[in-house]
Amino acid sequence: MNRIDKINTVAGLYYFRLSGGLHHCPPVACKVPRPLAHPASVLLASFHLCRAAKGLKALQPFERNGTDHPATNEQDMELREQGPRPTLAQKLGDVTHVSPLLRRVRQLSGGTDDQLGEWLLKCAVERGATHYEREFGSDQPADNSMLTNEEMGVALCLGHLPWNPAYLRAAAQLLSAPDIDATKLTRLAEMERAEPVLLHIAEAAGRVAPLQEPWAWLRAHLPHRRKVRTDDLPHWSRFVSQTGVTAFGDGPRIDWLCRGTLGA
């Protein structure tokens, strides 16, 4: 190690220790590029490097700081800025309305407002949206047959619910069945201001299964409400089942996800 390297290493170590270092990192040698051979330049560069190293501490999650090192002011601010999850309406740049359907879902579910989205998803899975089958909390209320499939599908698309693409995808599979009353669904979608989401699903179905109902009916009869942002809505490929190239050389197969039976 020549004289310049020694100066760089010692200066880096000195200022790293002086600045307090990181809680979970041992002191390291801060090497400065050769052009910074002048001692003043070495010290200045080392000082800025150590400031950057100290800044890393504030970016660590709270639990990574350890019990001996509580959250920094920067971490507290970051947690406050995260806030609650956005709603679907906020993602669309839309506003919510006084929803009779939401009030009905509250009454029939018997759960809290925080449970509504997950309750609707659980019930949709139990009714045939099997692609989204998973474990749900034991505290979720049981399904209520008084809520029709049309109502459940539209409820999953309400702007009041927290943003969760799985709700919209489950609604698409639940409503993709021959027993859905397309006229009733259209009327309910208009009343509940869910046209943008259902038309987005209908357009996705048009790419893969143009004759699939009720989506063909919705494309023809559901009026377009004012323009909202749909960039965050699921891509059409999220509503389908896709297979890769088979051993026989066949190309990938793409099927629209229709309602099935649990376990199918």
Image: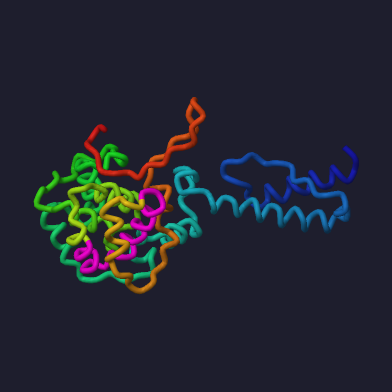
Judged left or right of residue 177, residue 29 is right
Where in the figure is residue 256, as x and y percent of width and height? Answer: 35, 45
Left or right: 182 in relation to 23:
left
Determine the residue positioned at 9% across, 52% down: 146
- Pick the front one: 12 or 227: 227
Q: Is residue 263 magenta?
A: no
Q: Is residue 7 left or right of residue 121?
A: right
Task: Name the one closer to the observer, 101 or 10.
Answer: 101
Residue bounds of the magenta highlight: 186-209
39 vs 86, nearest the viewer? 86
Toward the left, the furthest residue is 146
The way the protein has been coloured in the rendering is rainbow
Query: Residue at 68% of width from left, 47% of height from top?
Result: 17
x then y, percent, for residue 18: 68, 51
> Most extreme residue toward the bottom, as rendered?
226
Residue 232, image quadrant = bottom left
In the current view of this chain or complex, which residue is farthest to the top?
A: 247
In which quadrant of the rendered view does residue 229 lie?
A: bottom left
Residue 224 lies, in percent from the top left, at 33, 70
Most extreme residue toward the front, as rendered? Answer: 211
Number of labels in the image equals 0
